[in-house]
Amino acid sequence: MRPPEPNLQLDPHLIDAAANVLDAAGAVGLTLSAIAEAAGVSRVTVHRRGATVDDYIVAVLARASDDLRSSLWPMLTSSEPASERLRSALTILCEVCERHTGIMTAMFGVPPRDLPGRPGRTTSLEFIEPFAKLLGDGQTDGSLTAGDPMPDATLLANCVAWTYLHMRRAHRWDPAVAAERTVTMAIASFLTR
């Protein structure tokens, strides 16, 4: 798999189509032909753009990570104790997973991808880094206990995202109940006793 082109501009309508295909058919159903059909354009039109399926996957993931970052900004800049901010941030992660369920479930178990135009940034790092910051803030203010914030944040964010999605999709839990119970369970081991 080649890395995405750094200056490749994808049509937002085609990115929407890719997201819809991922939601309906998962990663195995995502082809350039499927994107064309979902967008209501010819396959030639999509192929002529020069983008690969992986480029569309990265574009859809980048949308989800941008949504998460902008949604988390108030928690990252607040002066509340880090433990309260982390709880709120993990609840926001559940809300973002809800808004991007198709891409999130389609990407379960798929390795991170480099984000074009963002050197050193990956689709995974974009989802993990804010939680590492909050764990580090919690070590500083004494409201959280963490070993190494980055691996702990990787475990925490993945536990919350995948558990939340499983409880919503497989068990059909209400979004608020799934978020509350998942976040409460996940954060417990990081709270200062």
Image (tube, grey):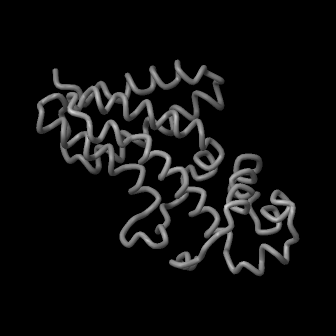
Which image quadrant is residue 181 in? top left
Q: Depth check: 66 or 125 in front?
A: 66
Q: Depth check: 20 or 170 in front?
A: 20
Q: Is residue 173 left or right of residue 121?
A: right
Expressed as whole percent of the image width and height from the top left, the position of residue 41 reads 86, 66
Q: Depth check: 85 or 164 in front?
A: 85
Residue at 49%, 65% (x, y): give it: 113
Q: Is residue 153 above or below residue 30?
A: above
Q: Is residue 87 left or right of residue 180?
A: left
Quadrant of the image containing the N terminus? bottom right
Expressed as whole percent of the image width and height from the top left, the position of residue 185 reads 38, 24
Expressed as whole percent of the image width and height from the top left, the position of residue 174 reads 60, 20
Quadrant of the image containing the C terminus? top left
Residue at 65%, 31% (x, y): give it: 169
Q: Is residue 110 left or right of residue 185?
A: right
Q: Is residue 106 above or below residue 112?
A: above
Q: Is residue 61 left or right of residue 172?
A: left
Residue at 17%, 25% (x, y): give it: 192
Residue at 81%, 62% (x, y): give it: 34
